[in-house]
Image (spheres, rainbow, N blue to C red):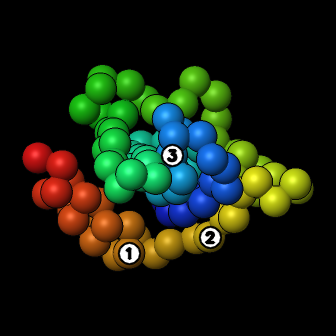
Amino acid sequence: MKYHLGFWHHLEKDQPVWMMSEVDELQNVLRQIDRFGDGTSLIRSAQAQGMPSLLEVPFEEEMLSGEDGEFSHFYLTKEEFERIWVNTAASTE
């Protein structure tokens, strides 16, 4: 498993400003949190939606590392991801 945090540098109010994803060895996105500029979050799980992945195409790290500076990409540990996932899930209930 890999855990990614991507910051998206833009001014679009209907798009997330950061995304945190859990990605398996087949490049399926299993869980993801999208955080918007107004502080709201969207939390999604492929399993809860009955899908193998939240994306229709395999995840590629290049999706979060645009050469034009549009994205900033970081890795998280499993523990960091789980802590943020639990806290976000609790605050969106």
Picture coordinates of residue 74, whole percent (x, y): 62, 70
Question: How far apart in space, not on screen, are marks 3 and 2 (Cα)?
Answer: 16 Å
Q: Residue at x 63, y 47 (%)?
A: 11
In the picture, the disc for residue 16 is 3
Q: Residue at x 69, y 64 (%)?
A: 72
- The relative height of residue 32 versus residue 87 in the rendered view (above or below) is above
In the picture, the disc for residue 74 is 2
- Residue indicated by mark 1: 80
Question: Which of the 4 quarters of the picture holds residue 43?
Answer: top left
Q: Residue at x 67, y 56 (%)?
A: 9
Q: Residue at x 30, y 23 (%)?
A: 50
Instruction: State whether residue 88 appears in this view.
Output: yes
Instruction: State whether residue 19 appears in this view.
Output: no
Crowd rating for badge 2 (residues with CA inside 10 Å; few <14, some 14–19, many 20+):
few
Residue placed most toward the observer, 4 or 27: 4
- The relative height of residue 84 versus residue 45 in the rendered view (above or below) is below
Q: Earlier in the sequence, mark 1 or mark 2?
A: 2
Picture coordinates of residue 54, whole percent (x, y): 46, 32
Amino acid on which the number 3 mark rests in the picture: Pro
